[in-house]
Each structure stands twice: as structure tokens, then as C-alpha cells.
Image (cartoon, rainbow, N blue to C red):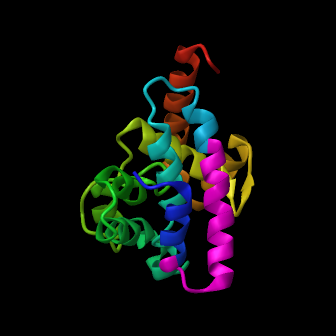
Amino acid sequence: MINEEEAIKILRKHIPSDEVFGKILAHVQKVKEIALRIGKKVPGADLELIRIGSLLHDIGRYKSGLGKEGIKHGIYGAEIIRKEGLPEAVALIAERHIGAGITKKEILEKKLPLQPKDYVPVSKEEKIIAHADNLVFGHEERPFSAVVERYSKELPGKVKDFIALKDEVEAWMKNSGRS
């Protein structure tokens, strides 16, 4: 596994704009901080995978932009990570971190511009990072109630998925005795 410095160099390589790089770096650093805080309380969580996966989860954001293509940033990120020769587990974090996940059924029903398959976090590390990412607006951590409020407006049918993801991650922390 690469270290943090190498991950940031890879992130920089794929985000040529200084302004965009600064914003994305601030965001992923905050996601990393939260994900590691959670991961330390979850038995069996791979903290190095969380560290590097958090830093690279939005590496595809520059390519996708924020418009209609923005939903593809996880897929673009996974492609970049694979081309960089990093572990598949890191690529899957990028590919599956969008919100609380996107199912094949949702892609087909909503005609989303994605290859029809499930993009849903599976591993503990994927779920921890997806949850941490949901708590960060820009580069600031927000309470989960703000996440619910935001997505109640933006994606009302998905709020239950955000809550289920949070509940699962919190259950792991509670069961560890380290919460």
C-alpha cells in the first residue's frame, strides 16, 4: 500500500487545477479524519486502506465536474486508481462511495448515465468512507441531522439508505466497546 504522501501526489497528478485540487484535498482530508476516527472503533477495519481510500475516493471529481457527469466521478476515480496500479480495494472505495450507494435498479429506473450494475458499498472500509463522506459538506463536518435534511430535499427516496448506512457503521462501533 502507498503512503499518504504518495496518495496526495497521485491525487495532484490527476487534478491539474490548483483551485480544484485545493478544494478536493481539503474535502478528502476531512473525510479521512472522520473515517479514521470511526475506523479505530470498528474491529477488523483496515486503517491503512481507510487512510488511502479516503484520500483518493474523489480523484475522479475533476474529470466528471459537478454537472450532469458528476455522478460518474466514482467510476472515473476507480478507473484512475486501477491505471495507477493501486489495490482493487482502493478502486472499489472510489467506485462505490456515492451517497449510500446506487443500485442497478435505480440506474435503470432513473436512466442515470451509468453502466447498469450495483455501485453499493460492501466492505467495512467502503461503508465507513461512504458514511464519513456524507458527513462532510465541502471541507466541514456536519451532524447527521444535516445530512438527512440535505438529502430529504435532494434525494428524498434515498434518505432511508443513508440512515441504514449510518446505523450499520454505528452498530460496529457500539459492538466494539470502543465507541
Q: Is residue 60 above or below residue 55?
A: below
Q: Quadrant of the C terminus?
A: top right
For the residue pair 137 and 150, the one nearer the viewer reads as 137
For the residue pair 23 and 106, the one nearer the viewer reads as 23
Occupied quadrant, residue 71: bottom left
| 134 left or right of 75 in image | right
Q: How many marks?
A: 0
Residue at the spot x=55%, y=78% of the render? Answer: 66
Q: Locate residue 13, reporting x and y percent.
A: 49, 78
Q: Locate residue 91, reporting x and y percent.
A: 35, 58
Segment colored magenta = 13-34
Asked whether the viewer can see residue 134, the reply is no
Q: Is residue 106 above or below residue 50?
A: below
| 92 left or right of 168 in image | left
Occupied quadrant, residue 18: bottom right
Q: Locate residue 139, reporting x and y percent.
A: 72, 60
Residue at the spot x=53%, y=70% of the render? Answer: 9
Q: Residue furthest toward the bottom?
A: 17
Occupied quadrant, residue 25: bottom right
Q: Is residue 18 magenta?
A: yes
Asked whether the viewer can see residue 19, the reply is yes
Q: Is residue 78 magenta?
A: no
Q: Residue furthest toward the left?
A: 116
